[in-house]
Amino acid sequence: MADEVDLHIGRRIRRRRRILQLTQRQLAARVGVTFQQVQKYEYGEARIGASRLLRISRTLEISLNYFFEGLDEPSSAPASAAAARLSPPRS
């Protein structure tokens, strides 16, 4: 199962790629991976190493921060509930 962070980063890659009107094949060729690997990144099925994420950011002409924008915001009630269960009890 894909991690929430991996899904978020994948969505950001897909969004920026489409803004630049690049195909998955074009992005893959520029980054040095197969287009299937780009698909896996975009769907959060594969994690992206730091050096590859840097290459992707340079290819997409954005900063690394772009991929992480919006992650600090709560995405759903179940995630908040899970975080509350992990918090230490108040005295």
Image (cartoon, rainbow, N blue to C red):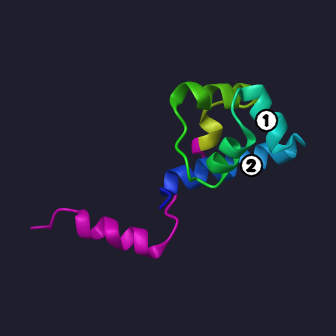
Residue 70 can be seen, yes or no:
no
Q: Which amino acid does the dot numbered 1 rest on?
A: Leu
Would residue 69 appear left or right of 74 to someone viewing this image? Answer: right
Given contact means CB atoms under 8 Å apart, are the residues at marks 2 and 1 in contact?
no
Q: Was residue 12 drawn as part of the magenta stretch in this picture?
A: no
- The percent coordinates of residue 36 (x first, y second) are 70, 45
For marks 2 and 1, the one nearer the N-term is 2
Q: Nearer the viewer, residue 78 or 31?
A: 31
> Going by the image, does 55 lie left or right of 6?
right
Q: Nearer the viewer, residue 74 or 10?
A: 10
Count of residue discs: 2
Q: Mark on residue 14?
A: 2
Q: Please name the residue shown 33% across and 69% down the image.
A: 82
The single residue placed furthest to the right in the displayed view is 21
Residue drawn where x is 69% and y is 49% of the image: 39
Residue at figure coordinates x 62%, y 42% from the top left: 67
Q: Is residue 78 magenta?
A: yes
Q: Is residue 87 above or below residue 6?
A: below
Label 2 residue SS: helix
Residue 26, position as x, y percentages in the image: 84, 35
Instruction: Please tell me whether residue 20 is drawn above or below residue 85 in the rendered image.
Output: above
The quadrant of the picture occupied by the C terminus is bottom left
Q: Judging from the image, what secondary structure is the residue with disc 1 in?
A: helix
Image x and y of residue 86, in percent: 24, 64
Which circle marks residue 27 in the picture? Answer: 1
For mark 2, does the 10 Å Cα neighbourhood hold few (<14), some (14 to 19), or many (20 or more) residues?
Answer: some
Which residues are the magenta region? Answer: 68-91
